[in-house]
Amino acid sequence: MRELGHRSGRGAAIEPPTEPTGTGFASDAVLRTDLHRSRRATLGGEVHPEAALFASRLARAVVEAPAGEREDGPDGSPLPALRDAVFGGGVVPVATPEAVALPAEPALVCREERVVRANAALARLAGADEADLAGVRLHKLVLGPDADAQLVRADGVVVPVRPVRWPVPGTDMAVIVLLARDAAPVVDPVWVTELERLARVGTWSFELATATLHRSETLEELYRAVGVDPDGAGAGPVEGEQVAALCRALRTGAPTGDHHVELQLPGDGMLSCRAQVEHTEDGVPVRLIGVVHDVSAERVARRRVERCCERFADLMAVAPGGVVLLDPSGRVLDANAALCALLDVPLERLRGVAASALSADEVPAGQGLPEWLRPLPPGADHGYRVESAPLRRGDGTTVWCELAVSVTTADDGGWLWLVACADVSDRRRAEELLRSAGTVDELTRLPNRAACLQMVDRLLAGPERERVAVVCGDLDDFARVNSSLGHDAGDDLLVSLAGRLQRELPFGCTAARLGGDEFVVICADHTEVGGPDQLARTVADLLRTTITVCGRPVQMTASVGLATPVPTGEVRAADLLRFAEAAMHDAKRRQSRGGIGIATDGVVSSATKALELEAELRAAIAGEGLVLDYQPVVGPDGAVLSAEALVRWRHPERGLIPPADFLPVAQRSGLLRELDLWVLRTATREAAGWPEHLGRRCAVAVNLAGLLPGDVGFLAAVSDAVDAAGLAWDQLVLELVETSLVALPPHALAAMAELTERGVRFAVDDFGTGYSSLARLKELPAQTVKVDRAFVTGVADDPADFAVARAVVDMARAMGRTTVAEGVETAEQFHVLRGIGVDAYQGWLFSRPVRAVGLRDVLLRGRLATPASAGR
């Protein structure tokens, strides 16, 4: 490549006409070329191939520049030190605007689009003091885009300027030089050289007339910094390939556009080399000019970005959940394979689909977006979750998904929705099955009391608890339907009313059945339905209707009670439900039929007293506040066959509270199960220590009202109590009211059968007082029937009571069941009952309820006295 001729600083193949060659010198023509190229690079000239790239990436390239060897400028100016102060690469870090050095041209330092410092040249150009310019908004000082910018002087005159900007690395500041567009640009070559050095850019030129190659000082420094021998160790200069290619194009007349090559450096380093032909105004080629830019840092950064994008794409591909990008209008831009599989739609068909078309719920006209998609600030911290939302699959079916929605920044600075979807259809089905197992009313399929309490507790724990409302409704005189048309007709009526509530209640309201003829409506936000009073009227109207039952129209009304959370204090679901029930009973008491009651202060005060009693009862169950009395059940000869456990509450202030006072409290507050468990465990433990009576063990009878065979844990609870006490299985009798033994589910019958096989006996308590008829006696899975005291009281002198008692005893005997008469208090009652075939007796005639110690004495004394034994 020696035919290229003289290279500055490398000898003289062709002697230049002026200026001796040397490392630090160049011909006037070369200097003019450098200055011309530098001016174009700085001011964005039309010809230079690197102008736009140089201006836009100058500051970023500076950040990656190594410290290298530093020298003063050719004129002794402290430009390297100034560079260090401006760009933070040296020992003097940039901390304040005053530390940023500015050129002689009009220039300023800005932060967050506000001027923080201006030099004297800018103050003169703007017609203001330097101090007056500090704090001015940049858009008020410089108007318009950079290509057509205007500086607004203090006197209102506008001056056309061309801004040249670069950020100060390591800070949030930027330097802006304002050059007048109507004047010939004057550029300090020393300043431009220093900028090239900071940007790791070097230039070269090849004079076609003299075949002279000249490298700028910055290019020589760049080659040394990256370890490149510019002369190729005798193989020719690095620029030789581009010079030869452009010269060959000139000789052949081929196009001589921008010529670009890349020089691979060790590791990931790379030099970008661009060259082109410079012509005179009449089109005569004069020289070749080239720009060499160290793009190693940019290349590394670009590769990092590419790898990051590849990792993100791989993550999207392998993510088990669906991910979709939506534009601000709600249309699909992209989605991963998991979402396509979830919706059974290929990506080509999915792109461009509106979010409203993905939603299985109908989107109201004019809304445009589904409810689960709403604008929010960018960033995952502002995202939200949707517990379950129905999406439409390609075949029209619905898939329920949990959604995580956030907004991310788009490439153009805008925003996009980022939505992650997880299929929760199986989870919803499992949750529904679990909920329905113990939280659904068997008759109406509405949520039962347990589900109602769970739902209200969940709402009260939310952020909008003050908007929750509960309305209880009790059908007026519902017993007349059962008595006149039968219980099946009553059941049909309840089912019809339940369906009416489900169909016609406002959105956000849920109907439930508490039991019997009592319904409850739970509203999550009463402001959506017109307020709590309007909600109460709506429920009353829905329960006030005419329903055809068994071909007969039945006019129904209901008394309703409304309760909302108190503004202060903690209220639980059971409290709110009691308040509503108290208001309902108050309405029924005041208005008889169809009344509406509101939980006023008086009603709440009364309910609060009941709440206090509930808390005390809860503490009594957990502590030592309850005791058991036992009343013997005797045979005709006075032998004690069993003893019924009767719970008593020894209140520290009120004394002994009878069951008639605290059992309703336990029932309303959901404590019956806990109370039953306490009685069962205590009775079995105490009975295990009873002495033998007439050569046999006496059985203990436990009355259950909250722990029922239909409960999932019934069998386990009974087994645990018996095993823990060490009681023989045939010493346990479980008494249940007849209503809890009718229409038992299969798992309840299986639990009872298992216990019966072990030796446990079941007794129907208070037979004849519930919903069952005598014909249903054969369906009850029990070995003993207890005749209620209501029939025993008048059995000796009331023909009706006598007839009922005899019918019960005869039917029980025919079905192989034994009978026990409750509440026997006179000898006449005993003789009549014995005459109709009653097997055992319980009442004050034989023994009052006694404590466990007293029962031991009774068992040790032998038979109790009976009218039969007294007659012998």
Image (spheres, rainbow, N blue to C red):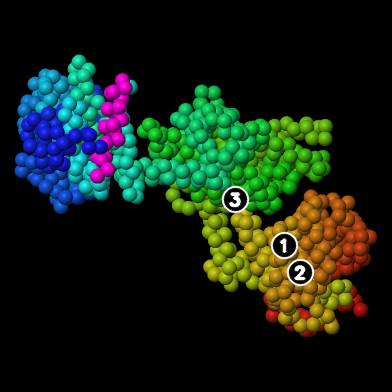
Position of residue 301 in the picture relative to residue 836 (left or right)? left
- Measured along the vertical axis of the image, is residue 225 above or below residue 845? above
Badge 3 vs badge 1, beta-carbon distance below 8 Å: no
- In the rendered image, the quadrant that contains the N terminus is top left
Q: Tell which residue pokes out farthest to the top in this image.
A: 282
The part of the image, by quadrant, that contains residue 832 is: bottom right
Residue carrying label 1 = 714
* Disc on the earlier residue, 3 or 1: 3
Q: Magenta span has 605?
A: no
Q: Which residues are magenta?
A: 234-253
* Disc on the earlier residue, 2 or 3: 3
Camera-nearest residue between 256 and 420:
256
The structure residue drawn at horizontal position 51% and vertical position 29%, both measured from the top left corner, is: 331
Q: CA distance from mark 2 to mark 3?
A: 31 Å
Of circles 2 and 1, the one toward us is 1
Position of residue 599 in the picture relative to residue 666 (left or right)? left
Which numbered disc covers residue 453?
3
Q: Residues within 10 Å of mark 2 (few under 14, many from 20)?
A: many
- Magenta stretch: dominant SS? helix
The structure residue drawn at horizontal position 15% and vertical position 22%, both measured from the top left corner, is: 181
Which numbered disc covers residue 701?
2
Q: Secondary structure at mark 2?
A: strand
Q: Position of residue 239 (x, y in %)?
A: 26, 37
* Disc on the earlier residue, 2 or 1: 2
The type of residue carrying mark 2 is Ala
